[in-house]
């Protein structure tokens, strides 16, 4: 099975051709991504209108490039998969409408994919991970702990009640005058800092629910920066290091509880249980170190797909389509509409409810 994937939900325009071999193994044949970072960085965040226009300009070229690099034409694919939510509606419209037009013209089935499902299933493409497993998605727009029971079978165990983790990094960077996107800048500054100088809050630590909260942390950073004004380079480094430490400690508690819950729900696993990370913040070494240590402690395998497959890409969307096809799940009608909000677990419920 061979599929063309399209991703336009945020600030990356992407197209990819992925194959699923008879033994179930996936192979990325081509994977092109155009980041709009430069177009948004002057504004310190993603501007929806600019994003939508940039998708319009780039998408057709990127699709051609993905097909060309794969050495095929549209006629050679078995289906087309496109992100249809959640995300910025302008970008989703561009990707989904393009996919519909291609599907109609080439008479191929269309799969409207939930972006979060793409992240959730990536580890099966890269590492052949078996169900069930836990996925921690940490990006600019999402912070979720999800039980992945199977394709189309997801249970969200925790989510942020305010800012996403990547957003906390970006806002902290902005406060400190560091460049956008904030994550890499904060991590770099933290390397020179004293992580024990500031004792930042660790929101929700100790609570039984598995949710996250990061807005209080951002406020504490602002107060620390104001108290230290005028901030020196060393102050910035110390704040960043202390910020990352607070996050590592918070995740240690939150995710630790998640791993314990997993072990309680699946006491006799066939394979070693696994925690998968996805999203741009997965690049952060302090976070990775904390998660690795936590997994070692609880007997979990820690899986972090390569960075370009953790951030937004079309290979994961293509793969989610292939997983659906392989299970015989129905393709989507060409009347399908994009959804700016589309939680992963109600996706499963909606499918069950409609008798599909
Ligand atoms: P989504 O719609 O999936 O939420 P997104 O574009 O907001 O997409 P990604 O592209 O997956 O998210 O990731 C971008 C985020 O990752 C930004 O908030 C960025 O600051 C953060 N990030 C990137 N590298 C690092 C790092 N080394 N440490 C911490 N955060 C990082
Ligand atoms: Mg992005
Ligand atoms: Fe994403």
Image (tube, rainbow, N blue to C red):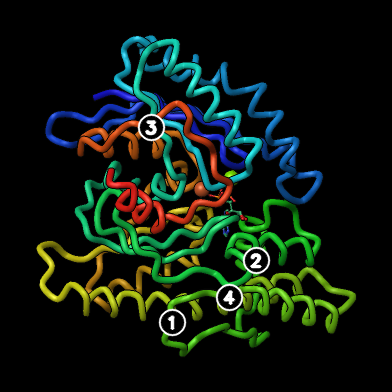
Depth check: 315 or 353 in front? 353
Image location (x, y in percent) of residue 212: 52, 74
Contact between marks 1 and 2 (CB within 8 A): the answer is no
Image location (x, y in percent) of residue 331: 33, 31
Mark whose residue sits in front, 1 or 2: 1
The yes-or-no answer for disc 2 within 8 Å of ligand 1 is no
Q: Quadrant of the N terminus?
A: top left
Element marked by disc 1: loop
Contact between marks 3 and 1 (CB within 8 A): the answer is no
- From the viewer's perspective, is residue 163 above or below residue 51? below
Q: Residue at 44% across / 15% down in the picture?
A: 104
First reached walking from the N terminus: tag 3 or tag 1: 1
Q: Is residue 329 left or right of residue 218?
A: left
First reached walking from the N terminus: tag 1 or tag 2: 2
Element marked by disc 4: loop
First reached walking from the N terminus: tag 3 or tag 2: 2
Contact between marks 2 and 4 (CB within 8 A): the answer is no
First reached walking from the N terminus: tag 2 or tag 4: 2
Residue sitting farthest toward the front: 354
Residue 209's tag is 1
Q: Dot 4 corresponds to which residue?
A: 213
Contact between marks 1 and 4 (CB within 8 A): the answer is no
Image location (x, y in percent) of residue 355: 28, 47
Q: Quadrant of residue 318?
A: top left
Packing grade of label 2 (10 A; few <14, some 14-19, many >=20) is many
Q: Separation of disc 1 and disc 4 at Cα? A: 12 Å
- From the viewer's perspective, is residue 95 above or below residue 229? above
Depth check: 226 or 355 in front? 355
Residue 351's tag is none
Q: Dot 2 corresponds to which residue?
A: 168
Q: Quadrant of the C terminus?
A: top left
């Amino acid at each position: 099975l061979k599929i063309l994937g399209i991703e336009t939900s945020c600030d990356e325009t992407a197209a990819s051709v992925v194959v699923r071999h008879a033994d179930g193994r996936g192979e990325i044949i081509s994977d092109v991504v155009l980041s709009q970072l430069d177009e948004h960085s002057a504004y310190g965040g993603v501007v929806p209108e600019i994003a939508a226009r940039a998708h319009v300009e780039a998408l057709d070229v990127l699709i051609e490039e993905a097909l060309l690099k794969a050495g095929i034409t549209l006629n050679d694919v078995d289906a087309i998969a496109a992100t249809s939510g959640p995300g910025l509606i302008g970008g989703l419209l561009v990707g989904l409408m393009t996919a519909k037009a291609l599907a109609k013209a080439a008479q191929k089935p269309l799969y409207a994919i939930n972006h979060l499902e793409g992240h959730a299933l990536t580890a099966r493409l890269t590492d052949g991970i078996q169900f069930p497993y836990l996925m921690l998605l940490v990006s600019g727009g999402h912070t979720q702990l999800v039980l992945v029971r199977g394709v189309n079978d997801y249970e969200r165990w925790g989510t942020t009640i305010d800012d996403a983790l990547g957003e906390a990094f970006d806002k902290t960077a902005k406060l400190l005058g560091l460049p956008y996107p904030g994550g890499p800048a904060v991590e770099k500054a933290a390397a020179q800092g004293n992580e024990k100088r500031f004792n930042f809050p660790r929101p929700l630590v100790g609570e039984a629910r598995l949710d996250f909260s990061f807005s209080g942390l951002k406020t504490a950073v602002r107060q620390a920066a104001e108290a230290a004004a005028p901030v020196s380079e060393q102050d910035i480094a110390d704040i960043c290091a202390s910020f990352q430490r607070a996050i590592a400690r918070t995740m240690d508690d939150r995710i630790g509880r998640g791993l314990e819950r997993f072990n309680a729900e699946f006491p006799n696993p066939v394979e070693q249980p696994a925690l998968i990370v996805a999203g741009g913040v997965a690049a952060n070494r302090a976070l990775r170190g904390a998660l690795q240590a936590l997994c070692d402690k609880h007997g979990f395998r820690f899986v972090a797909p390569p960075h370009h497959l953790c951030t937004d890409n079309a290979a994961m969307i293509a793969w989610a389509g292939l997983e659906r096809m392989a299970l015989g799940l129905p393709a989507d009608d060409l009347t399908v509409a994009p959804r700016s909000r589309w939680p992963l677990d109600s996706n499963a419920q909606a499918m069950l409810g409609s008798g599909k």
